[in-house]
């Protein structure tokens, strides 16, 4: 017999109650749409979103339509954090190599290679992380925002490729594609519209 040790805080009539064990939740008649969280979870989720509760209560996971979206300021800050982290790693590696290598041409080649490696790595990193279980790069995780499809689900690698490649259309000309975020309720930039993606924030109670 499988034992479940997690205890959940349950929102009852708009107020958090508990924590309750899984057995106690059974007695309370937990429903798929009830909001719950453990002490380790940063935010509340509907019961059907949690694998353990789906297993115990035989809930079916439902699509959760995003309702809260990341603004341009959050997106830009997340991008800056990611670029700073990636650039920092390469700069440290490049500086170390320059200290070891004395040949001037080799030093110049290392410096120029960073101009290619940093954006390429940044692109690949975004594709991999946005299509992963986390649905977010490190910068987005810090700000508690993540990339999803129009139904709030994880995107595929192909969609992540399209999304990040199409950022060119958001940058050019004059960042107009990014300014579109101010003219639609779901706060999509041009590359989001093309790829069919959203950048959502954690739901708040």
Image: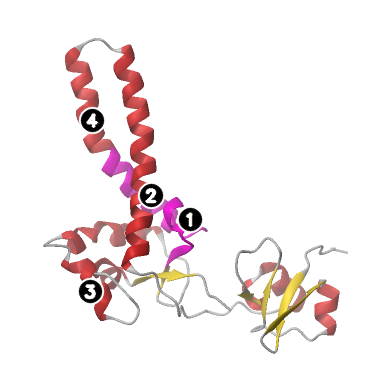
Q: CA distance from mark 3 to mark 1?
A: 24 Å
Q: Which residue does the numbered mark 4 point to in the structure image? A: 113
Asked which quadrant contains residue 192, the reply is bottom left
Residue pointed to by mark 1: 142
Question: What quarter of the picture does the N terminus occupy?
Answer: bottom right
Farthest residue, direction left: 173
> What distance separates the C-alpha of mark 2 from that of mark 4?
21 Å
The residue that appears at 38% across and 48% down in the rendered structure is 82
Q: Label 3 belongs to which residue? A: 180
Residue 8 x/y as whole percent: 75, 71
Q: Earlier in the sequence, mark 2 or mark 4?
A: 2
- Pair 1/4: label in front: 1
Of the residues under marks 1 and 2, which one precedes in the sequence? 2
At 48% from the left and 55% from the top, the residue drawn is 142
Mark toward the start of the polypeptide (3 vs 1): 1
Q: Quadrant of the C terminus?
A: bottom right
Q: Position of residue 32 (x, y in %)?
A: 67, 83
Q: Is residue 159 visible?
A: no
Residue labelled with disc 2: 81
Give the CA distance from mark 1 to mark 4: 29 Å
Task: Write the residue at 61% across / 64% down.
Answer: 42
As helix, strand or loop, the secondary structure at mark 1 comes to: helix
């Amino acid at each position: 017999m499988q034992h479940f040790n997690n205890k959940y805080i349950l929102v009852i009539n708009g107020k958090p109650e508990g924590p309750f064990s899984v057995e106690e939740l059974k007695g309370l008649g937990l429903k798929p749409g009830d909001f719950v969280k453990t002490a380790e979870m940063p935010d509340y989720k509907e019961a059907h979103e949690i694998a353990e509760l789906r297993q115990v209560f035989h809930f079916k996971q439902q699509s959760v339509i995003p309702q809260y979206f990341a603004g341009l300021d959050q997106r830009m800050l997340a991008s800056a954090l990611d670029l700073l982290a990636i650039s920092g790693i390469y700069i440290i590696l490049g500086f170390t190599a320059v200290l070891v290598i004395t040949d001037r041409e080799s030093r110049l080649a290392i410096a120029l290679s960073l101009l290619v490696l940093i954006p390429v790595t940044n692109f690949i990193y975004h594709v991999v992380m946005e299509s992963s279980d986390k649905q977010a790069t490190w910068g987005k995780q810090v700000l508690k925002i993540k990339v999803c499809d129009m139904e709030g689900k994880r995107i595929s690698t192909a969609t992540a490729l399209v999304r990040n490649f199409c950022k060119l259309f958001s940058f050019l000309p004059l960042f107009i594609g990014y300014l579109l975020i101010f003219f639609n309720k779901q706060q999509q930039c041009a590359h989001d519209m093309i790829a069919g993606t959203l950048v959502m924030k954690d739901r708040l109670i």
